[in-house]
Image (cartoon, helix red, strand yellow):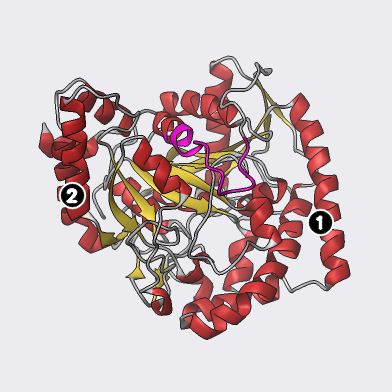
């Protein structure tokens, strides 16, 4: 059985360990073996932590032998992303100049993983400064999509997405301010959860100062998994209390009952949506209808305006706060991508920035009113199939085309809402994908609907690199 443990999701693997059928060391050895088999072709995990992982697994087995209480992820292998502090590891963010920026303490999510009994086997790749939807950098190189090597693995959690799809552990950490969990989950055909801001605590002691306003309002940590039930479990684990993040909110994981009513937005207004993705979204709607959800084709308010407003706020943050560091330390593709970003989202002056924040408040109010009637919104995960690898830096208009195809990735963070990416259907070598969106702190509604869609679609096993 140990040679196949890497194929299991975290729920089944944790159960086998808990009942003593396999050990944490056996589970870790199986995943490490899978990493050895496929990671050289994918470059998803860029820091190997097997030595400390085996030590942690042995400690977990000893703890279980003593009869001590076990956490929900006891013995389950996971990974973390290289832009997040983990004690003894560099928080390099894909930047050569930061390769020796060693964290002296764990970030909250790493502490929560460890408290739940998870075994951290490696660190996953990200684009330079985590600011592209394509995962490559001059420090670690490019990450490959296991479903189709010619296409992007997404970003910025592209390493996590590739590792998830290829079976290099069942749970992988990502973060998301502009689709960095949901887009790589879509590109690699896996599940990705973007929680409500303030739900999962986040803090890097290696950071030189506080976050820009866009980061405070929109940046989150979230899991990538192959099953919705693993997303549910890892979400609960990572949401544990931590007072180092002033945004963290002590809110129950389950909200009050809500009407099983869904607003279907199969095509994004103002954008061209690929017919295959429209079809996948309508298929997901049928799955929900058969399970008793009332699905109505109706668009939420001002979706295109929400995407444009993200550009105004976050674009200003990037060009004002991050531009000097990118120009000083970034690789050529990161700098080129930033220049393309400048054309899509030029920086605002102070008056324009203040007005953009006020516009955001007004728009959120409209959405929350809409969500009171339609507690779930169902939409395609992207308007386009995954782009060729390196597309954004390959031409002057690459960023323009990229963001025109992905308003979903930025509108949802702008609104501060949770969203779950779920794979639906097959499009060539790839999976289609949908997003389920709900009101703030109603991840439970997204997860419940996602489980219905997943049950209808069937299991999502790991894939061998194409």
Q: Position of residue 39 (x, y in %)?
A: 23, 58
Between 202 and 457, the one lying in front of the other is 202
Inspect this view and state whether residue 188 appears: yes
> Which is the main secondary structure of the residues drawn in magenta?
loop
Q: List x then y, in percent, for residue 382.
A: 57, 50
Instruction: Verify whether residue 236 appears in magenta.
Output: yes
Span shown in magenta: 234-249
Q: Residue at x 21, y 40 (%)?
A: 6
Mark 1 vs mark 2, CA separation in Å? 46 Å
Residue 28 falls left or right of residue 150: left
- Judged from the image, the secondary structure of the residue bearing numbered disc 1 is helix
Question: Where residue 148 sits: x, y (%)?
Answer: 34, 57
Identify the residue position indicated by label 2 in the image: 32
Label of residue 357 in the image: 1
Which mark is first along the chain, 2 or 1?
2
Quarter occupied by residue 224: top left
Could you say which is closer to the camera, residue 351 or residue 207? 207
- Location of residue 106 in the rendering, given as x and y in whole percent from the top left corner: 41, 53
Asked if residue 189 shows in the view, the reply is no
Q: In which quadrant of the rendered image does the N terminus lie?
A: top left
SS under mark 2: helix
Are dots 1 and 2 in contact, CB under 8 Å?
Answer: no
Point 43% across, 58% down: residue? 85
Observer-nearest of 283 and 257: 257
Classify 91 as above or below 302. Answer: below
Q: Quadrant of the C terminus?
A: bottom left
The answer to which quarter of the image holds residue 262 is: top right
Name the side, left or right, on which 404 lies relative to 99. right
Q: Is residue 86 above or below residue 207?
A: above
């Amino acid at each position: 059985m140990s040679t196949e443990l890497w194929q299991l999701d975290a729920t089944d693997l944790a159960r086998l360990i808990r009942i003593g059928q396999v050990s944490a060391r056996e589970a870790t050895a199986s995943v490490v073996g899978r990493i050895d088999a496929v990671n050289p072709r994918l470059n998803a995990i860029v820091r190997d932590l097997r030595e400390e992982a085996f030590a942690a697994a042995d400690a977990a087995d000893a703890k279980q032998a003593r009869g001590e209480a076990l956490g929900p992820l006891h013995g389950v292998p996971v990974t973390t992303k290289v832009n997040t502090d983990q004690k003894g590891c560099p928080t390099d963010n894909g930047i050569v100049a930061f390769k020796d920026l060693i964290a002296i303490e764990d970030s909250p999510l790493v502490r929560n993983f460890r408290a739940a009994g998870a075994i951290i086997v490696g660190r996953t790749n990200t684009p330079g400064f985590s600011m592209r939807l394509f995962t490559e950098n001059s420090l670690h190189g490019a990450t490959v999509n296991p479903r189709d090597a010619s296409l992007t693995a997404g970003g910025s959690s592209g390493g996590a997405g590739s590792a998830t799809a290829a079976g290099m552990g069942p749970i992988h950490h990502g973060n998301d301010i502009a689709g960095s969990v949901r887009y790589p989950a879509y590109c690699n055909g896996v599940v990705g959860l973007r929680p409500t801001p303030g739900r999962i605590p986040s803090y890097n002691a290696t950071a030189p100062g506080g976050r820009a306003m866009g980061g405070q309002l929109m940046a989150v940590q979230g899991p990538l998994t192959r099953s919705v039930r693993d997303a549910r479990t890892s979400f609960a684990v990572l949401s544990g209390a931590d007072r180092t993040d002033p945004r963290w909110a002590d809110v129950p994981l389950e909200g009050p009952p809500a009407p099983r009513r869904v607003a279907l937005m199969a095509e994004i207004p103002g954008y061209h949506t690929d017919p295959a993705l429209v079809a996948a979204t309508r298929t997901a709607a049928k799955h929900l209808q058969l399970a008793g959800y009332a699905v109505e084709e109706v668009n939420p308010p001002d979706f295109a305006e929400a995407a444009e407003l993200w550009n105004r706020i976050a674009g200003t943050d990037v060009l004002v706060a991050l531009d000097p560091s990118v120009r000083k330390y970034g690789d050529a593709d990161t700098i080129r991508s930033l220049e393309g970003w400048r054309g899509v989202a030029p920086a605002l002056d102070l008056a324009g920035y203040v007005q953009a924040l006020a516009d955001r408040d007004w728009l959120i109010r409209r959405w929350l009113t809409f969500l009171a009637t339609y507690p779930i919104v169902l939409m395609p995960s992207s308007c386009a199939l995954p782009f060729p690898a390196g597309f954004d830096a390959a031409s002057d208009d690459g960023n323009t085309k990229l963001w025109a195809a992905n308003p979903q990735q930025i509108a949802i963070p702008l609104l501060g809402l949770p969203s779950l990416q779920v794979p639906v259907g097959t499009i060539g070598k790839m999976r289609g994908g949908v997003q389920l969106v709900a009101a703030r702190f109603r991840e439970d509604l997204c997860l419940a609907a996602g489980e219905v869609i997943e049950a209808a679609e069937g299991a999502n096993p790991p894939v061998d690199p194409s």
